[in-house]
Amino acid sequence: MTAARHPPRKRFGQNFLVDRQYIDRIVAAVDPAPDDNIVEIGPGLGALTRPLLARVKRLAVIEIDRDLAARLSAEFSPDRLRMHNVDALTFDFATLGRELRVIGNLPYNISSPMLFHLAQYETNLRDATVMLQREVVQRMAAAPATPDYGRLSVMLQTRFRIERLFIVPPGAFRPMPLVDSAIARLTPLERARAQIDDEALFARVVAAAFGQRRKTLKNALKLLATEEELEREGIAPGVRGETLAVSDFVRLANALARNL
Ligand code: SAM
């Protein structure tokens, strides 16, 4: 099966990995054991699927492209490769059970929604090793008061430890993307995870704080918190949201949840 026989579909973000060295590094980063419960998002032409199947007994895959799904399904028996020919953005990962290990060279056009969707299944996950645009990985792992720190950083860092593993250059793909890619590993914090009393309110506070980055917190959170409420939590109303640590957002949202 070669990329030449499948015209890459832009709408599905199809850039296929062709560099053996990087394929091996990604699989080595996952280091799969034969009985691991693994799901690959977007297997495409199978660049990662084949070496994974060489190491595990069975593998679930989620592929939206009907043609690619049919090709891969024809190559492996259904007891080894469980194909879900659906949109991963609406897929219920809980149906795959616990201790789930996710791997995926994710389509760049849906990277943030895909990460938010996956984050909902944190209690099912053992880890997720994903390839994304390099700048998205920088945003995921960013520290407060840096330009990359934002909603994605806070929402993911409350739930996961995020490691930046390595960069993958455009030349490793066909067709070549315009930007560098990077591999990130997300591992649920489990017991180290902060208690968030009202997840929906927390998400609203974080979204509002970063909605207009140039605004001070008292303005950005006008509809959610008073200046007094901010001060009571030790947060200066005149600062910008990007200076708050993840723990500040948790403390503030929990205090607001108590006042509801
Ligand atoms: N894993 C392959 C590789 O590394 O060569 C393909 C990676 S390519 C960047 C992304 C893959 O995800 C494509 O096969 C594409 O069809 C698939 N895809 C795109 N959107 C998807 C979605 N919403 N749900 C599931 N698969 C999707």
Image (cartoon, grey):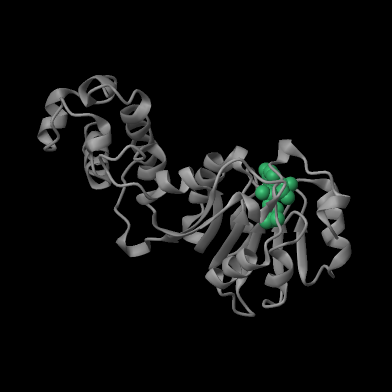
Percent position (x, y) of residue 150? 36, 37
Task: Say whether residue 28 is visible.
Answer: yes
Task: Say whether residue 98 is visible.
Answer: no
Of residues 89 and 134, the one nearer the viewer is 134
Q: Residue at x 59, y 75 (%)?
A: 32
Of residues 20 and 156, the one nearer the viewer is 20
Of residues 115 and 224, the one nearer the viewer is 115
Q: On the picture, is 133 further left or further right than 76?
A: left
Q: Residue at x 68, y 64 (%)?
A: 48
Percent position (x, y) of residue 21? 63, 68
Is 22 placed above or below 228 here?
below
Q: Residue furthest bottom?
A: 34
Q: On the picture, is 3 further left or further right than 19?
A: right
Q: Residue at x 37, y 61 (%)?
A: 189
Residue 1 found in image quarter? bottom right
Is 2 placed above or below 14 here?
below
Q: Residue at x 38, y 37 (%)?
A: 151
Q: On the picture, is 253 further left or further right than 156?
A: left
Is 8 placed above or below 127 here?
above
Of residues 17 and 191, the one nearer the viewer is 17
Q: How many marks?
A: 0
* Quadrant placement of the C terminus: top left
Residue 25 found in image quarter? bottom right
Percent position (x, y) of residue 43? 72, 57
